[in-house]
Image (tube, rainbow, N blue to C red):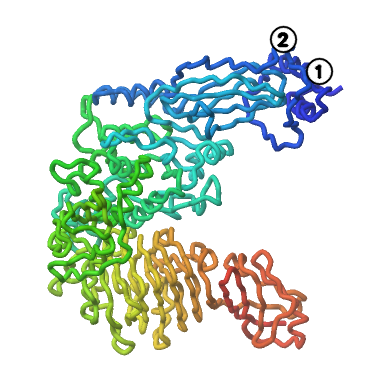
Amino acid sequence: MKTLTKDTFFVCIGRVCSMKKKNKSLILIGFASLSLVLASCGEEPKSSIIDTNDSSIDTSEDSDDEPVNPTDNQIKLLSPSPSEEIQITPTPLMNYINAKTEQEQIAALKVADTERSNNLTCTSVKLSWQKDGSAYYTISLSTAEDFANAKEIKVSSLFSEQEIYNLIPNTTYYWKVKGTRSNDTSEVSSFKTLGTSIRFIKASGAANIRDLGGYQTKEGNHIQYGKIYRGGLLNNFNNLGGLDENGIKTFNEDLGIQTEIDLRITGMDDGNQSKCFFDSNKNYVQATIGQYNRILDPESFAKSNGFDSYKLLIGKDGSGMAPNYELAASVSGVSVKSLRTIFDVLSKEENYPVYFHCNAGADRTGTLSYLIEGLLGVSYEDIVKDFELTSFSKFGNRYRSALSEDGLSFDDSGVFMDKAGENYVGFSKLNEDMLNYYGEEGKDLSFAIYSYLTKYVGIPSSTIEKVKSILTSTAEANSYAISNRQEFALSQDNISIDLSSANIDENSIASIEIANIDLGTNPNEISLSAIKEAGLSGEREIVVKAKKEGQDITIYVPILLVSKYISSVEEFYDLDTYRKKIDNGSDRARVINFGYYKLTSDIGSESSPLLSYKIGGYIHDQLDSNGNIGFRGTIDGGNNSVYSQAAYGGLFSVIGGGAVIKNTNFVITSYASASGDASVVGALGCTIAGAIIENVNFTVTSSCYGNSDSQLYGSGVGLICTSACRSTIFKNVSVTSPVKLVSLFGGLSYDGFAGCQFECFNIDCQELSYLAVKAGMGTINQSKCVLPIELNGIKGSYQTYDKDITPIDLNSKFASISLGNLYGSMNLIDVYYKDNKIEDAILENNILFFNIKTNFQDGVSRNGQLKINLEKDGLACSHSINIQLIK
């Protein structure tokens, strides 16, 4: 006789649930008794939700069955009792959040050291009821008494209780339970959740998750619950944690999250995640940002660290690294492009609910939370507490600043951690700098963050207002957006904006401003002096507030501020304001260029190209890959051509965060003479980070054939850039070259090629070894090279060539040639030896096979070349291999 185990018992229950109704009740009574026996042996199962789509479960109503207990013919709700108030915030969290003084807050934070292993989050509300013998039970739960938009949870007949997590605090919930029998729905009951306004989220496998909802803004509104969440990683990178199956269900079903925003460094500390973790069909946004005051503009960051300018911070050029190079390079220029992307996503209702995260959900996540909450008008006291709550998670302490010597208060440094090789945590320092460099006397934090986002990052005011409206569920102010962008040259003293389409009385205008800069009230005579002083250029938005038909109206006027129209080689040379030599000496200008430039004609010619030595040559800090230096403005080529050498450092040295290069044809007429490490040469620059390259063509002319292999095929040649390309978007870009190239993206740091996105990137290259390479002094690390086929969005054709000679024994029947791991993901089209097609060739597991006897019937020893044609997803590759036929 077989022993009835717990698993066997559950299988039996499933089968009973599918039996005819008249036979089911008595058997269920027996199983109910047996379940008590199993429970007495320590086998009582916990509550679970069943799948009513399972064909083994009868989901029809049982109108003829008797209940398990004949004296009860109705489901009865047991707990919570009607109108019961239930605390859902754990006591340690409550104590910290309610602490008023710094001393009380520190004492509450120190408790986190003993509670951290518990990974504190919300507590559950346990619902229980008396069963009536139904096949399963459906719990309806709603914040509305009429059960509008009720959440339904189906529970197995084995259970009579269910734990509910992630409820909104200080909210009344209504609930009822329905069975599968006719007319056996319970009465309605209610309970109220208690706790702080902060909503902690439990999602199995992940940690440090909470809703940004509940915080009060300065206008008296609240951030809405269920709109935007912050937290830790989801994909278990470096075993730091990640959603399991139940956690994924929480994200999709309970929270309904539609967009994942990943703030980590793409391709470096994100586990190579490339799509939404909890649902590959939902939005996944890669948006690398820095943390704390590393997101400031470089000049403000330098002043924050005691230097009058960024140039003084970085130090003079020399044979070695500048003394403050690492500190200067820590500024995250990449954040500019990312923040533009993030706020654009947040301005669209269809993207919500949104979840944003880094790894710990503390530093980069805390920085973005600071910007969002501060912008919405949440008090700094509340923002600080939201930040420090990470201390109660497994990711460790995050304090606003270091503790004083007596441990009873926070010191004035604003920095909690700043040790070489460890994390930098400077939350209060970020707030201090934000107010100092973007605020004004008498203005609050919301004003400062708005200025930061509109002045430095360049986010339109209309986008910010949409984000505010969505997150606080307040109606947008009556507004009108002018459709056509109006263009002005910054060489002018005054401008006039056209408001005719808004149809307002200009005498009703109360204010005109741009990025918190007052421009008066006269749209026909706006002085550009304050705009120039603030360093504004490019695509911006003027905000006009006026009256229309007796109602307040906000008019958004898109404008383009052009720093200069470029028509000559000399003017183009002047764009590299960072690398430019001063008085022909060794000192460099180191002025970061944020300007907007339009080409009005071709620059240079094939016979007279731009020459690298006239631009500036080599500087050590052009290896920076955080995108904080160099050219960070916009070049609109107007479909004109720029003729230049490819040289070490290229045209711009560094193209940094927020830069846009568009509508330009770059024609490479020659390679600069170089040797050794400097044989790594490229067109645009040494480094590109956090930029957009759009509608750009790169063409290499045949005149480059005259150069030596050391210049064209050297250790790390990158046609586009030479050292690193990170977090950059390429849209509608083409590369055409009749010249052999090692790569398009060189060459000194493989880790620097990460996070790039390719949208219609077409290549037509005579010979291209790799898309990107890692190279040192003359040696390519093939194991870390990147092939075009490895990235989505790259189309066209290219050729590769294996210099080695592969011997083929004519006495063998079959040839097997290993292609390594370079082309195994591509589909084999055909193989040719000279003009003769190789019959029956196949490619399996990166090895090319073909019949030697069939294809080389003459058996004559000789040397030749195989051309292997491959294709995948619109990208074709012709790979040539030298072979030696021997007997």
The residue positioned 50% from the left and 73% from the top of the image is 769
Q: Quadrant of residue 394?
A: top left
Q: Is residue 820 above or below residue 238?
A: below
- Horizontal side, residue 788 vs residue 699: left or right: right
Q: Quadrant of the N terminus?
A: top right
Is disc 2 placed on a helix, strand or loop?
loop
Residue type, mark 1 in image: Leu
Residue type, mark 2 in image: Thr
**3D distance between C-alphas at marks 2 and 1:** 15 Å
- Horizontal side, residue 470 vs residue 802: left or right: left
Camera-side residue of 143 and 363: 143
Residue 329 locus on image (x, y percent): 28, 55
Residue 315 locus on image (x, y percent): 18, 59
Q: Quadrant of the C terminus?
A: bottom right
The residue positioned 49% from the left and 39% from the top of the image is 241
- Horizontal side, residue 834 vs residue 530: left or right: right
* Mark 1 burial class by Cα count in 10 Å: few <14, some 14-19, many 20+: some
Q: Quadrant of residue 509?
A: bottom left
Marking on residue 26: 1
Mark 2 or mark 1: whose residue is earlier in sequence: 1
The residue positioned 49% from the left and 62% from the top of the image is 784
Camera-side residue of 49 and 226: 226
In the image, farthest residue toward the top: 71
Residue 313 locus on image (x, y percent): 19, 55
* Residue assigned mark 2: 71
Residue 611 seen = yes
Camera-side residue of 709 and 552: 552
Q: Is residue 479 above or below residue 741?
A: above
Camera-side residue of 711 and 836: 836
